[in-house]
Image (tube, rainbow, N blue to C red):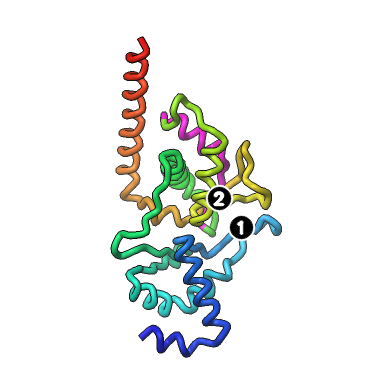
Amino acid sequence: MWSERYETLTSYEKGEFRRISNYLLSHTYMVRYEYQPSAQMTLPNSDYQMASRIFPLLQEYFSVTGWQLEKDDNYGIMFLFNLYDHNRLRIDRFTTLFLYTCRLVYEEEREQANSFHTVRTDTQTIVEKMRMLGLLEKGKTTQKERIDAQRTLAHYNIIQKMESSAWNSEGNQILILPSILSIVSNRGINDMMAELEEMRTEDLSSSERNEEDAR
């Protein structure tokens, strides 16, 4: 049983087990490499290294509580999901569209991605692509929408801000992390594009109805 294996850990390892378990429950995703703004370089994530060491124990522990912990060492991703489809995060429409657009950018640039499987971009590039796809209402977005969307995705280790300063209302340099692949798979891209087109069509129809009502 997992509890018996847990007792074989050192006091330090037990503390790390508790800390990392709580981290995964809060952030869902963990990546093997993180960009360190202070060093201006990507370095190994010590939490991922520890989690990999005790991965079988973590996986067994979470399975007892109705969660499944998965690890992809090819892309350096660890993620947690609920077996009963509970505890789902509800995100607003703009954040959803921002996430989808990040996935499209990742797919377009992944062949040029570095050995850490990250894609470098910036807020303005993402927003401009959303505009080109017709995903922005009246072609505009607010500073609050952009910052809130990026903060949410960064919290779950889907993107990472490259600056050490606070999120900038004018935009930031960001890394799209390989964890985005587990949210929308390669096979899911066509479905995602169809969904984006449906959203765009609904927006156009709504806008046309509003114009007719105003006449």
Of marks 1 and 2, which one's residue comes earlier in the chain? Answer: 1
**Which SS class for mark 1?**
strand
Give the residue at x 54% y 37%: 125
Kind of residue at badge 2: Leu
Give the extent of the magenta segment.
117-134
Magenta span includes 124 = yes
Provide the residue designation for mark 2. 175
Give the residue at x 48% y 64%: 76
Provide the residue designation for mark 1. 35
Residue 107 in percent (x, y) is at 43, 46
**Cβ atoms under marks 1 and 2 closer than 8 Å:** yes
**Which SS class for mark 2?**
strand
Magenta span includes 157 = no
Where is 161 relative to 145, above or below? Answer: below
Where is 93 relative to 6, above or below? Answer: above
**Foreground of the two, 87 or 198:** 87
Residue 47 in percent (x, y) is at 55, 70
Kind of residue at badge 1: Tyr
> How dense is the environment of label 2, judged by Cα within 10 Å: few (below 14), some, or many (20 and up)?
many
Image quadrant holding the C terminus, namely: top left
Give the residue at x 57% y 66%: 45
